[in-house]
């Protein structure tokens, strides 16, 4: 058997149908995996790049809600597969093969598409979420899986205890067999000898195909199930000794690797701001692990001196990410992420903000800790992010105090 | 009395299964194709379905999925002359898979077991 054989015999399913209601209004017109991130990416680009970099090129993306934006992105940005060589990326909206219902949960989405597994007959199926930010070599996980006996290997991340209650908490024995699992417990169990950290389920599942089919078929017949891998399938497999955990950590240091489930607007904002820090947790400039994205054909970004009737002012960009075609003219941009074709005009100041593609900031505007979705025009003289009471009367403001302006919202001058 | 729906396009097999299941104490009803079978599932609410796979029109594999979409608690026994369907993932949601035989012992015993299980659960 060639060394590539396990990769060819592994089918990848990316679950990309989530509504992402907690990311609203960024998910007003798009599903969570299609939310722009880091200036030029969509969230799903990280998972897809991991697949390509890991040599996994047989991919189904299961879509459901508001899939137009994601469809468009995948078609334009990920049309890179050699179909003749057996590679593929197909988008799979609900086919209504099984019935007329929509997917009721992650396991139900797989159950509805058993037809695809029957057609492909892969040895393993890798199930991924399309809304996580991380860089992971699935090949190392595949090798771990093939070396063990368990029909399911799930990836586990070490995360701080605070916040761990949002995830499935794992207990493992010395052979990495999962011996305990609690989905989103109020009091998460910490790691032995490490009371500040927990081992959590990342939602990255590598199944032997027959086991996967058996489990989702059984689950589909259960009246009490919500048909979800985390809530239903994993808890029933753990007591039967069928699950091993693969710890997601840096190969050499064994330090926990960076992984974020972008669940809320505040976690989206924090993960974004991390990118403009001096040493980001996720390196976008690593040429050994490129993160691909669809790039609008755009001229280079530039900053220029702004000249007005009041004089001139330099265009300045500090500690920021700037997409193609963006112009900062006589304005100051600090610790911010600007997408493509953004324009920031004279005497304006943008700090710790995220401006998505096509945002236009008029003269003398001030934006501080604001997420501005695509194509919003900020009128001259507008100030957002400095007056919480006023901001709350006009916009969505998160618990963390971040103002969010929806796509194409019209603002009063 | 528990009602068993037999879906099979071969009249003599329907008769055979009906006879033996009635003898075993079940009420029976029959459908000559999958479309009719689906209609009976909805209108006559059987307690269990015996489903042939190769039939003219809709096959039993598709009918299985449609039955479970309507009612995922109803036991379905796939009963076919072809053992090869056993490897087809689309048949794995069935409660049992039986290769057809003129000896109906296995079929009748399976029906008994599944309906006994169902009774215990409910």
Image (cartoon, coloured by chain):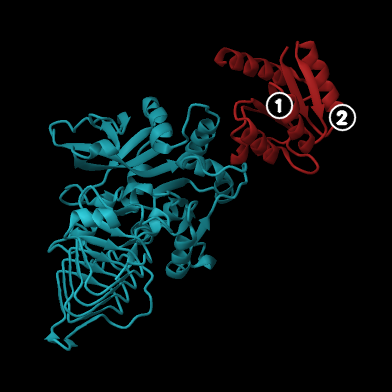
Q: Chain of mark 1?
A: B
**Disc 1 designates what residue?**
B49
| Residue matched to label 2 | B11
Above or below for A390 versus B96: below
Quarter holding the C terminus of chain A is bottom left
Q: Examine the rendered structure and indicate whether residue A291 appears above or below residue A266.
A: below
Query: Which chain is displayed in cyan in the rendered image?
Result: A
Q: Earlier in the sequence, mark 1 or mark 2?
A: 2
Position of A235 with respect to A65 (left or right) is left
Instruction: Decide if residue A152 is on the left or right side of residue B60.
Output: left
In front here: A169 or A328? A328
Tint applied to chain B in the drawing: red
Q: Is residue A237 above or below residue A347?
A: above
Same chain under badges 1 and 2? The reply is yes
Disc 2 chain ID: B
Residue A406 falls in image quadrant: bottom left
- Of residues A93 and A387, the one nearer the viewer is A387
Residue B1 visible in rendering: yes
Number of residues whose C-alpha sits closer than 10 Å to that of mark 1, classed few (under 14), some (14–19) or many (20 or more):
many
- Which mark is in front, 1 or 2? 1
- What residue is rendered at 79% in x and 44% in y? B57
Residue that extends furthest to the right in the rendered view of this protein: B12
Secondary structure of residue under mark 1 = strand
Q: Secondary structure at mark 2?
A: helix
Q: Describe residue A88's horizontal placement relative to residue A357 as left or right.
A: right
Percent from the top left, x then y, of residue A70? 45, 61
Residue A241: percent from left, percent from top: 37, 28
């Amino acid at each position: 058997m060639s060394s590539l054989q396990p990769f060819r015999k592994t089918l990848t399913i990316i679950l990309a149908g989530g509504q992402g209601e907690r990311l609203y209004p960024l998910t007003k017109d798009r599903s969570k995996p299609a939310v722009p991130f880091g200036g030029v990416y969509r969230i799903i680009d990280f998972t897809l790049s991991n697949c390509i970099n890991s040599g996994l090129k047989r991919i189904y993306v299961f879509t459901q809600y508001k899939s137009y934006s994601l469809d468009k992105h995948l078609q334009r940005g990920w049309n890179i597969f050699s179909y003749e060589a057996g590679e593929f990326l197909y988008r799979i909206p609900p086919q209504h093969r099984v019935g007329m219902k929509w997917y009721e949960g992650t396991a139900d989405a797989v159950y509805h598409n058993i037809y695809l597994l029957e057609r492909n007959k892969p040895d393993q199926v890798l199930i991924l979420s399309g809304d996580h930010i991380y860089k992971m070599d699935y090949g190392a996980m595949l090798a771990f899986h093939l070396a063990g006996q368990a029909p399911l290997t799930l990836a586990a991340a070490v995360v701080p205890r605070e916040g761990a209650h949002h995830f499935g908490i794992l207990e493992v024995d010395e052979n990495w067999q999962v011996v305990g699992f609690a989905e989103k417990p109020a009091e998460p169990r910490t790691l032995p000898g490490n009371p500040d950290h927990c081992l959590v389920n990342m939602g990255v599942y590598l199944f032997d195909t027959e086991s996967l089919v058996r489990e989702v078929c059984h689950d589909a017949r259960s009246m009490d199930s919500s048909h979800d891998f985390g809530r239903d399938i994993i808890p029933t497999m753990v007591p039967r000794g069928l699950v091993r955990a693969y710890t997601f950590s840096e190969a050499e240091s064994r330090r926990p690797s960076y992984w974020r489930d972008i669940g809320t607007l505040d976690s989206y904002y924090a993960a974004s701001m991390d990118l403009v820090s001096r040493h980001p947790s996720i390196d976008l400039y690593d040429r050994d692990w490129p993160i691909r994205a669809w790039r609008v054909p755009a001229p280079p970004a530039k900053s220029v001196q702004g000249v007005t009737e009041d004089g001139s002012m330099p265009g300045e960009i500090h500690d920021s990410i700037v997409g193609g075609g963006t112009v900062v003219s006589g304005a100051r941009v600090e610790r911010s992420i600007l997408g493509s074709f953004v324009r920031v005009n004279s005497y304006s100041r943008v700090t710790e903000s995220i401006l998505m593609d096509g945002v236009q900031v008029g003269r003398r505007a001030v934006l501080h800790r604001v997420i501005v979705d695509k194509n919003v025009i900020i009128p001259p003289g507008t100030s957002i992010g400095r007056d919480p009471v006023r901001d709350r009367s006009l916009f969505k403001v998160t618990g963390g105090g971040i103002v969010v302006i929806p796509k194409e919202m019209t603002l009063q001058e | 009395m528990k009602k068993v729906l037999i879906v099979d396009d071969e009249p003599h097999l329907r008769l055979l299964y009906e006879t033996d299941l009635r003898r075993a104490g079940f009420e029976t009803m029959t459908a000559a194709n999958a479309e009719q079978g689906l209609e009976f599932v909805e209108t006559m609410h059987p307690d269990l379905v015996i489903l042939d796979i190769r039939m003219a029109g809709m096959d039993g594999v598709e009918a299985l999925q449609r039955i479970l979409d309507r009612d995922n608690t109803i036991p379905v026994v796939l009963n076919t002359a072809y053992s090869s369907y056993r490897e087809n993932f689309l048949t794995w949601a069935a409660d049992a898979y039986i290769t057809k035989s003129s000896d109906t012992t296995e079929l009748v015993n399976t029906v008994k077991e599944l309906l006994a299980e169902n009774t215990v659960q409910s």
